[in-house]
Image (cartoon, helix red, strand yellow):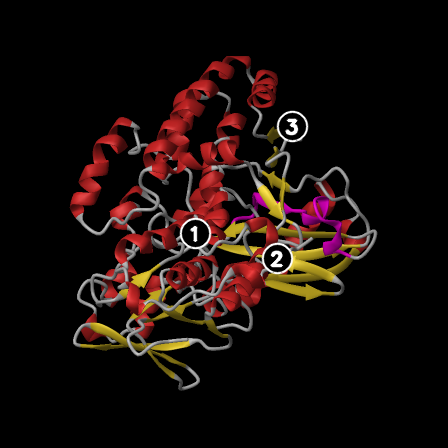
Amino acid sequence: MATPSSQHAVVVGGGFGGLAAAIRLRARGYRVTLVEATSQLGGRASVFKQDGFTFDAGPTVITAPWLFDELFALTGRRTEDYIDLVPVDPFYRVVYPDRSVFDYVGDEERILAQIQRFNPGDVDGYLKLADHARRIFEAGYVKLAHVPFDNVSDMLRAAPDMLRLENYRSVYGLVSKYIQDERLRQAFSFQPLLVGGNPFRTSSIYLLIHWLERKWGVFFARGGTTAIVDALGRYLEEIGVEVHLNAPAAEIEVQNGQVKAVRTEGGKRIPCDLAVCNADPSTVYMRLIDPRHRKTHSDRAVERKRLSMSLFVIYFGTRKTYEHVAHHTILLGPRYRELLEDIFERKVLAKDFSLYLHAPTRTDPSLAPPGCENFYVLSPVPNQRSGIDWEREHERYRDRILDALDQTYLHGLRDNLASVHSVDPRYFEGHLRSYGGAAFGIEPTLTQSAYFRYHNRSEDVGNLYFVGASTHPGAGVPGVLGSAKVLDHVVPDLPRAARVPVPSSGASQSVA
């Protein structure tokens, strides 16, 4: 029950960052309303069902599961009563053009045995690389992922560690310091692509992803990533968060330099004491806040930011199963550096591609009809600043990818397709309202990391906060969940008398 003195927080956007922010604010006694532009929660982690298949639209790699434990523990609940996380092994299967295969796993002995087969001279180099990744993880993730970078002084305090750990190098550059075999260099440097970065430009601080996966493993939620979203949605209902779907934000109303309300496109005005945007900050500043309130984030400043790449994704179901396919497979093309330059720098649609193939039915067969298989295949492509005419290119590019899979890795695919749906950068720009069609917000270069990313607390508008891929600490599920933790440092605590009590955990039910 709200009291006259209770503080009202409005969360804009129901992706993982917004869901976590709403839970954290509610646990601290705020009255919370969440508005989501689409018909379902999840943001990039939404779901659609077609022809009996259940397709996760977005993130499928779940790491650092303890971040979910933290969210549920805030109100005395347990993750296992809501979500069933299943370990994935191998984490990723990397398949090269020469058909050689490298299974990236958590067990060091298995990794070293594979490196021995590729290049015995790189065994010792990998041990040194892994130790370097561990030290970056401890300095860059354990110490800094949950704290704000509001001021230059925050960055200066982190600078000595960053220099000592050679974070001025790119991920590929630091990997190459220790690894000589080009195939292994690719296996240990592709991870920035999972958060929207070019391994040849992304700061080696993102090598922490390697150790994060080694330390906690890679998981998949039974029922798909959407099962996590559904569980968090149920959690919001239990603790009294008001959720409005099909309610895209149209304006963040500002008075005297402070947030006063969020207006939706349907004409609803929601007064608030603070707002947390899980929506893309570039879109929020450019489209939802009047320019007179934006000294720092003017249109020109926003347009100067480098954007991540976009994605072309094909969701498809087959009438047969492919038992040789791992849950996560990276199908590398004939070019590595040159292809990434086409995508990130030249912004052209290349004739070749590298692909990420997701096969969730390898872990959870219930996501497809009996005897069938569920997939999505993802190809990094330039964002909308490329000027590519996707109306003309979409079908042609989709067929090229399906033909390549049919001829190389999923033989007989064309004859066994039972369901197909595909999206291109227009989906990210339009449906997901991501500026420039960037799939991961701004690009994670050194000059767009930590203090140089969008701040979690707005410099322009009082009581306006941001979580999500373009904020600190960055994209990916652990990153956006971590961005919500930053709110604990920047959003004021409420006096005890002003807090709205949180219902007990008695309403929770087991997923078993």
Tell me the kind of residue under disc 1.
Answer: Leu
Question: Looking at the rendering, which quadrant does residue 274 occupy?
Answer: bottom left
Disc 3 is placed on an element classified as loop
Verify CB contact (< 8 Å) between mark 3 and mark 1: no
Instruction: State the residue position of label 1.
Output: 481
Of 497 and 401, which appears nearest the observer? 497
Decide whether residue 133 is among the magenta residues. no
Q: Is residue 316 left or right of residue 94?
A: right
Height in image: 289 above or below 61?
Answer: below
Q: Return the mark for residue 227.
A: 2
Of the numbered discs 2 and 3, the one sitting upstream in the chain is 3
Vertical arrangement, residue 2 with respect to residue 357, above or below? below
Q: Earlier in the sequence, mark 3 or mark 1?
A: 3
> In the image, which residues are magenta?
350-368
Identify which amino acid the numbered label 2 is placed on.
Answer: Ala
Disc assigned to residue 455? none
Q: Circle 1 sits in a helix, a strand or a loop, which is it? A: helix
In the displayed structure, 109 sits above or below 463; it is above
Q: Which mark is residue 100?
A: 3
How many neighbours does mark 3 have within 10 angstroms: few (below 14), some (14-19), or many (20 or more)? few
Residue sitting at 56 percent across and 19 percent down? 112
Q: In the rendering, at what x and y percent does residue 498 appear?
A: 30, 69
Q: Quadrant of the N terminus?
A: bottom left
Give 184 or 268, whichever is nearer the viewer.
Answer: 268
Classify residue 159 as left or right of residue 209. Answer: left
